[in-house]
Image (cartoon, helix red, strand yellow):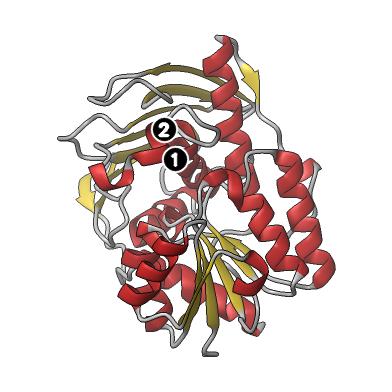
């Protein structure tokens, strides 16, 4: 596997704790880090043994084979565009952008340059979630009738900051609900048609962006989904339930950054555990798949199109919560051709 030289666009917690180890496990190396703060960039580079630290986006993209973007959400579009225009393949944290038009433009730019553009949604790299999706599409539980996702967690203090402030790109919907949308993208062949939602501000911090949301999603074939996403629930076990005409699949503790969780099938034969196979680090899977795509020997775990569809769902949920109305979800397949 090719040893990629990576630019880290964002001196973030996830870059330090998850992505640098994943990059190194695939033979790659982070060689430069970008931050808006010179002091933070230098401190991050020193702590992670990275050669270069900079506040200049152009300089960060010099002499690298790939860019990983984990800056604040509003910066993703500008940084992804700059990387693609510099001829650098991009692996971008979710959400790709805060605007569907920008996401479409980025995918078109990547296609026009023949560059790989992936989205670092980690849950589709989970062995439990992948097995769940495979069983659904194999017809193990018959015709799907409903889905319920419980993704209520307690946001660690180190990750609060801008996520709970009343600023663009903040809040639980663009941080967690967008992850649910990526999971739903694996479970269904089409996006939901409509979204309804209610939000709340529950946390033990100054009131800012919504930190809890419950949604109802509806597909044109009458399938319904519910999600509960929160930063405010300290003692909970996450879950994904998929209900079908011939059984139910129940995934527990799999909506996490770690390769954990269990999968159970309940049908007329009773209740039994499902073997999900090899449990690999989710970020190693993402980086390895991205590297294979850059080499031309594989495909990214989550494409730009899939990442854009997740954004479309999240933005519809956000609008529904703000307006109190049921909102149509944009089907991005009508906007995009399949992206690399």
Q: Closer to the camera, 177 or 68? A: 68
Instruction: Please say whether residue 308 is visible from this viewpoint.
Output: yes
CB under 8 Å between discs 1 and 2: yes
Characterize the local packing of mark 2: few (<14), some (14-19) or many (20 or more) Cα atoms within 10 angstroms: many
Instruction: Please say whether residue 340 is visible from this viewpoint.
Output: no
Residue at image coords 52%, 50%: 94
Q: Marks 1 and 2, Cα distance to the nearest angstrom?
A: 5 Å
Q: What residue is shown with label 1?
A: 175
Q: Residue furthest right?
A: 112
Q: What residue is shown with label 2?
A: 172
Characterize the local packing of mark 1: few (<14), some (14-19) or many (20 or more) Cα atoms within 10 angstroms: many
Image quadrant assignment for residue 60: bottom right
Q: Residue furthest left?
A: 235
Query: Left of 101 or right of it: where is 256?
Result: left
Q: Quadrant of the C terminus?
A: bottom right
Residue at image coords 47%, 63%: 38
Secondary-structure class at tag 1:
helix
Q: Closer to the camera, 251 or 37? A: 37
All told, the count of numbered labels is: 2
Secondary-structure class at tag 2:
helix
**Image coords of residue 264 (percent x, y):** 26, 48
Residue at image coords 74%, 75%: 87
**Image coords of residue 197 (percent x, y):** 49, 18
Image quadrant assignment for residue 18: bottom left
Q: Residue furthest front?
A: 39
**Image coords of residue 225 (percent x, y):** 46, 28
Query: Left of 48 or right of it: where is 253?
Result: left
Query: What is the number of the mark on residue 101?
Result: none
**Image coords of residue 213 (percent x, y):** 40, 23
Residue at image coords 31%, 62%: 276
């Amino acid at each position: 596997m090719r040893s990629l030289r990576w630019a880290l666009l964002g001196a973030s917690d996830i870059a330090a704790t998850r992505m640098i180890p994943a990059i190194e496990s695939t033979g790659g190396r982070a060689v430069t880090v970008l931050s808006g703060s010179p002091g933070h960039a230098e401190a991050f580079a020193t702590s992670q043994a990275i050669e270069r630290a900079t506040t200049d986006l152009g300089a960060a993209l010099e002499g690298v084979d790939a860019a990983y973007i984990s800056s604040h959400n509003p910066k993703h579009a500008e940084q992804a565009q700059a990387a693609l225009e510099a001829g650098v393949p991009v692996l971008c944290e979710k959400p790709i952008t805060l605007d569907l038009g920008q996401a479409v433009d980025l995918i078109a730019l990547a296609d026009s340059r023949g560059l790989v553009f992936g989205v670092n949604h980690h849950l589709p790299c989970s062995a439990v979630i992948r097995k769940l999706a495979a069983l659904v599409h194999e017809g193990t539980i018959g015709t799907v009738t409903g889905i319920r996702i419980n993704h209520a967690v307690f946001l660690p203090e180190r990750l609060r900051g801008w996520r709970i402030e009343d600023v663009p790109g903040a809040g639980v919907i663009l941080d967690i609900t967008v992850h649910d949308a990526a999971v739903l993208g694996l479970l269904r062949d089409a996006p939901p048609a409509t979204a309804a939602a209610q939000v709340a501000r529950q946390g033990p911090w100054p009131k800012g962006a919504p930190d809890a949301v419950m949604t109802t999603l509806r597909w044109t074939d009458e399938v319904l989904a519910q999600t509960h996403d929160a930063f405010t629930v300290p003692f909970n076990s996450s879950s994904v339930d998929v209900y079908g005409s011939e059984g139910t699949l129940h995934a527990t503790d799999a909506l996490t950054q770690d390769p954990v969780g269990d999968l159970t099938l309940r049908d007329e034969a009773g209740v039994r555990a499902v073997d999900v196979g090899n449990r690999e680090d989710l970020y190693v899977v993402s980086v390895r798949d991205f590297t294979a795509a850059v080499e031309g020997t594989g495909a990214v775990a989550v494409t730009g199109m899939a990442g854009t569809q997740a954004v479309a769902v999240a933005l519809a949920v956000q609008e529904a919560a703000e307006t109190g109305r049921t909102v149509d979800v944009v089907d991005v397949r009508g906007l995009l051709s399949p992206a690399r």
